[in-house]
Image (tube, rainbow, N blue to C red):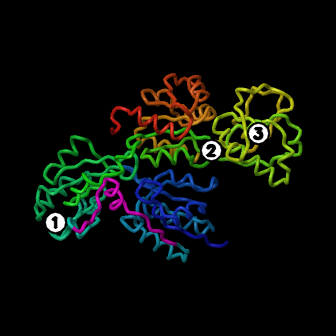
Amino acid sequence: MKTGKVFLVGAGPGDVGLITVKGLEAIKRAEVILYDRLANPKLLDYADSECELIYCGKLPHRHTLRQENINALLVEKALAGKIVVRLKGGDPGVFGRVGEEAAALSEYQIPFEIVPGISSGIAAPLYAGIPVTHRKHAESFAIVTAHDKSEDGKPLLDWEGLARGVDTIAFYMGVGNLPFISENLIRHGKPSTTPVILIHWGTFGRQKTLQGTLADISEKVIESKFSNPSIILVGEVISLREKISWFEKKPLYGRQILLARTSDSPSELAKELLAQGADVIEFPKWKVTKQPLDLKRVASYEKIVFTSPESTSEFLAAVIEQEIDVRSIRAELFGMSSKTIKALRERGLVGKLTSELLDSENMLIVGDHHLLQKGFNQAEVIVTSHKELDRQFLPIFQRMLHEAQVNTMIFPSSASVKPFMAAMRDCDINAIELLDGKQVIAMGELTQAAAFNAGLVSTEKPVSPSKEALVNYLVEHRLQGVQE
């Protein structure tokens, strides 16, 4: 059997847009992905639906997989002929043990590539408005691990060299040792007035910061219950933050959004919300199997109904592939949502909403098997795809939900409501209880009605079911505790 190949990939600091092009290409090719806690799980959305996902990150007080087990898994999967990605938060060469994993692969003569990533020690400060060097404030920079370096868990470092020789210091995962860090830096020459900032979940929409000095930061951390994962930055360059803070000024910064999903890939709506500064968790994740379409009788229908935007593209692709003259299709076109109508319009076709439609025999319904309208009993049906819940993603979603503090729920279409509620039950989560007290938003009247019917009686809606209207609505209706 041919030996596979391993890509040791840096996932970047959290924001999915910060992964490298090469890293993303490796994820898309992968047959097996071993991923860490600090690699944003949203990156797994880009993997093939048949890709095997293995969680090997560390949670506080619990090691899911020991390093030697990870090395053995990489070797085992590669020797089985698989394309394997080892996905690590930040850069794999910065406290990522990539040297140990590469050595294990080399021992078995397994080909591998190391794909650098953006390190959180540089990216998190930039998202907090702080460059780690500046010609007027800092000419040197150090990245330091701040835990598990000795028997009692206290870092064994060249404290004098750090205190006297480095302008800006980034400590990784050191919140528990912060009093020890501050004490040693002051003892070895750093002024007690030196600025310190903690950046929690840096580059995510849930990013939080806590600022102080070496003298008082430990007390502030206790008062505010700050925790890992956090970067601790020490240095005078922090003073620039007041002038160049940018990420926290984005319109949706502080919004932690749960977005009901109807497709198998990240949605354009999610991308827009992320671009505006929100944290977005899309759920559920679907496995979609495309079906061959038999369009021999397509010219005979008086009406054609599309259940989703995806069904329009799948139908038209089949028309082209089967060399059907589009002029022979004389049917009126309908869509079950305004997004489907928009998808038709983008292809030069005019459609109407199904609210204006009556059941008839000479009618064709096109869509995936979950969205087919049961009210049209006389119509014929063409199933474009079969969609089933991707159960590999259920534990991933549960962990994402646990680590976030969701304050907003968005239903993009009426078709997204029932599958979302059902998938939540599969996760042993009561959606009504989870969303109690959260802002629940429906994109359009039909979607709002579907949410009401599902028991979400406090559902709101923007003036129109567009991305722009939604963003404006979220900005205008800020939540208590979300940054003004």
Which residue is labeled 1 in the image? 163
Q: Give how far across and how far down residue 71 sits, in percent.
A: 48, 66
Amino acid on which the number 1 mark rests in the picture: Ala
Q: Give how far across and how far down residue 404 sits, in percent.
A: 41, 42
Q: Give how far across and how far down residue 308 sits, in percent.
A: 68, 39
266 over 382 or under it: above or below: below
- Of labels 3 and 2, earlier in sequence is 2
Residue count near mark 3 (Cα–Cα under 10 Å), binned few <14, some 14–19, many ≥20: many
Relative to 432, is 262 on the left or the right?
A: right
- Quadrant of the drawing holding the N terminus: bottom right
Look at the image and say whether residue 133 sits in the magenta stretch.
yes
| Spatial separation of the CA atoms under disc 1 and disc 2 | 52 Å
Residue positioned 56% across, 64% down in the render? 26
Which residue is labeled 2 in the image? 263
Which of discs 3 and 1 lies nearer the camera? The answer is 3
Question: Tag on residue 418?
Answer: none
Relative to 407, is 173 on the left or the right?
A: left
Which residue is labeled 3 in the image? 366
**Total residue callouts:** 3
Indicate the secondary structure of the residue bearing disc 3.
Answer: strand
Magenta stretch, residue numbers: 113-135
Relative to 483, is 49 on the left or the right?
A: right
| Spatial separation of the CA atoms under disc 3 and disc 1 | 68 Å
